[in-house]
Image (tube, grey):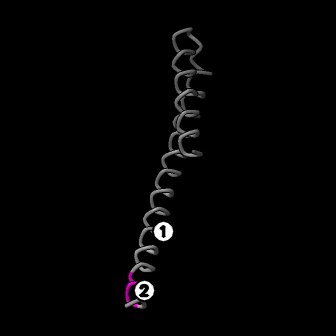
Amino acid sequence: MLSAAAAVAGLSIIVAGITLMFFDKAQPAYLTTAAGVLSEFIAAVFFYLYNKTILSMSQYHQKLVITQNIALP
């Protein structure tokens, strides 16, 4: 949920920056768009870390299942 919220926030910041560009406010628009791109990068890192966590949990769970199958005849 945190990753998705960060991605949505970053996208809304980028859209706000593009909107400012249409109103000829170039300096704030560049800063806002850069902040949005940075937010999207942070969201991508969150998604990557979440994926690694899920893979690690899956591997651990598989080891528990194998141990249980060996222990119970």
Could you tell me which residue is drawn at 58 percent across and 40 percent down? Answer: 6
Q: Quadrant of the C terminus?
A: bottom left
**56 relative to 16 in the view: left or right:** left
Determine the main secondary structure of the stretch shown in magenta.
helix
Q: Quadrant of residue 62?
A: bottom left
Q: Position of residue 21 (x, y in %)?
A: 53, 15
- Of callouts 2 and 1, which one flags the residue occurring earlier in the amino acid sequence? 1
Displayed quadrant of residue 12: top right
Q: Amino acid at mark 2?
A: Thr
Q: CA distance from mark 2 to mark 1?
A: 15 Å
What segment carries the magenta color?
66-70
Dot 1, crowdedness within 10 Å: few (<14), some or many (≥20)?
A: few
Res 34 → quadrant: top right
Vertical position of residue 51 compared to residue 14: above or below: below
Q: Residue tagged by mark 1? A: 57
Tell me the kind of residue under disc 1.
Answer: Met
| Magenta highlight on residue 4 | no
Q: Which residue is mark 2?
A: 67
Tell which residue pokes out farthest to the top in this image: 23
Q: Which SS class for mark 2?
A: helix
Counting from the top left corner in percent of width and height, residue 5 is at 58, 38
Picture disc at residue 49: none
Q: Under tag 1, what secondary structure? A: helix
Residue 47 location in percent, x, y?
48, 50
Quick check: 1 above or below 20? below
